[in-house]
Amino acid sequence: MAIDTEQDQQGEIARLRAELDAKNAELEALRSRFEAENTDLVHRLDQFRAIFENAASGIAIQNVEGVITAANQTFLGMVGYGRQELLGLPAAAVIHPESAHRTLADAVRQGEAAPLRDERKLVRKDGSSLWVDLTTSVLTEADGTPRGFVCVLHDITARKRTEAATRESEQRLRQLVERLPVLIHAHDAQGNYVFWNRECERVLGYGAAEIIGNPGARALLFPDPDYRRHIEKLHSDASDFAGWEAETAAADGSVKTILWTRISGDSPLPGWAAWETGMDITERKAAENALRASEHEKKLILDTISECVLYQTTDKRILWANRAARALAGGEPKDLRGRRCYAVWHGYKKSCTASPCPVDQALRLGTPVEAEVEGEGGRTWLVKGYPSFAPDGSLAGAIEVATDITGRKRSEEAMRRARDLAENATKMKDEFLANMSHELRSPLNGVLGMLDVLLDTDLDAEQRDCIQTALQAGEGLLAIINDILDFSKLQADKIVLSRRPFRLRHTVRTVCNTFREQSLRKGLDVGYDVDAAVPDTVIGDEGRVRQILFNLVGNAVKFTHQGSVRVRAQILRKGADPRQARLLFTVTDTGIGIPAEQLDTIFDPFVQLNWAKNRKYEGTGLGLGIVKRLVTLMGGIITVESEMGGGTTVHFWVNVELPG
């Protein structure tokens, strides 16, 4: 029994020892596996540390309070901090104020735990900034409780600079396109307007807000449905076009002609599938239409005139001819165009040599030239050549205008012969009048002389009255003969003015005294006034001055029944020469006056006042005509002022010289 018990005990001990050995072996195996796993874990941790430190991306770890607890070398290089400087700082210390908005920590506190990706602007230790692409994830405990955050950062500063440069470039391009003096608009892929520059607004009157994004924009610009469908079909076509004219409705109701060019494919700005540049050619089209209309009108005008008009090149080839020229040449425009003018008109094989050609001379001299040219059939042509210049100033050709002046030349020849005959007749008349005047004056002077002698004899009253009447009639006849002789000399320009010194005051006094007896009989006051500035002696034709005054004072006395007749003389300096002067005379009366309608003709030859054509005022009508011609001959002017019943004033001046 005891033996069994001992055996049982030994067996239990053996079993226990065996179990203990098994446990030790199992424990050894666990220890070996733990050591292996620990070694692997250390290795992996070393690998993680190496990856963490050497990662191309910046990595930072912060606790739930937002304090940085770890950071790799890349992140330290990004922010410019040393490790010991950075660890323990709040994450906000490296975040730029512009990016200090909602973080993952804020989201976690609000019950959200999804990773957060964002672009943030950081601030370096030195104050400079950089942009990063930030991905933030939550680190949790085994039970899911957040214990921190891991932040992975990629430096995108270069990309942001590129984007900023791109945006700036796009902005500059947009501003440039916006301000170009060219119409520019763009469409998206659906054909909607996405751009409408200022020139479009200025020319068409629609603001960008009215066009961009407006599905009915095309209806505004192209109200005609058929025309609009044509436009839409053109825009739906993928091909580009250039130089397409579109009639476009403006906001003010007018229609503008726009010359469009479409460009698709490479777009200068985002969102542009195709864009078009345009030029407002409304005024140019109107000018072209006006020019065509003007050219048509000019052609009509040139075709209706009787002159032959041709346009030629510098080598005398005809480019254009009007209807008269075509009719003369006997051909249509196509028959003349390109032919040389001398071959058309004269059948020559080379340029005209018989006489100088005005067109040749105009081309050579570059100025208009005209000449008379003898043509076939005894006809005479007035040919005018006008050089034509190109816009750059070079000689382009010449315009030839030919007028048939055969009839005019014959008329001129007939008129020349008639003029010669008239001049000969006038010469004969003047010679006859001069001869007859001399022939009449000689016996008449004898008769007057004998009557003067007879008055000195012993006569009774009746005889003396008869002789005085005969003497007055003879003196009147002599005055008429003298007027006729003077007028004929003036007509023939045979009067020569003398230049002798004379005493003007004496001359004026003599004229006034001549009419003293007649004025006393009528109760008139005839007087004169010579200005003190007038020299005692002047140089000129005293006889003609006396003749002018005699006629004017005589008329004044004749037509004045009461009141006075006054003669006034003044001197006027003519210019810088102190020896040249003008004598201004004024003859004033208080007579019956001259009708206003006859003032313009009072100095014409053989003209008398209508109411004066009676025996009381009869005369030849030559006196004032002679006066005007003498005044003009002496370089002066004569004028008259008169009022019916209020008298007459005559002003005239003549040129004289002053003694040195």
Image (cartoon, grey):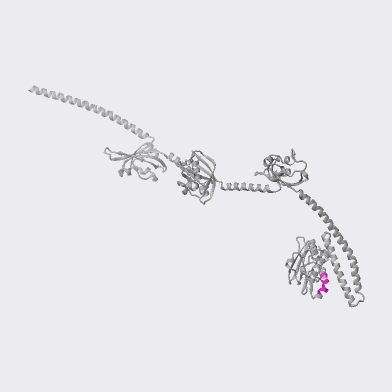
Residue 481 lies within the magenta run: no
Tell me where residue 5 appears, x and y as whole percent: 9, 24
Query: Image quadrant of residue 78?
Result: top left
Residue 515 lies within the magenta run: yes
Viewer can see residue 146: yes
Query: Image quadrant of residue 456?
Result: bottom right
The reply, left or right, for residue 243 in relation to residue 355 is: left
Q: Residue furthest bottom?
A: 460
Q: Nearer the viewer, residue 234 or 513?
A: 234
Q: Nearer the viewer, residue 290 or 397?
A: 290
Quarter of the image with the C terminus is bottom right
Q: How many marks?
A: 0
Q: Is residue 48 above or below residue 630?
A: above
Tell me where residue 571 appears, x and y as whole percent: 77, 66
Q: Residue furthest left?
A: 1
Tell me where residue 197 appears, x and y as whole percent: 50, 46
Viewer can see residue 657: no
The reply, left or right, for residue 195 in relation to residue 422 is: left
**Which region is colored magenta?**
510-520
Q: Is residue 492 above or below residue 278?
A: below
Q: Main secondary structure of the magenta part?
A: helix
Q: Residue furthest right?
A: 458
The residue positioned 66% from the left and 44% from the top of the image is 390
The reply, left or right, for residue 455 in relation to residue 161 is: right
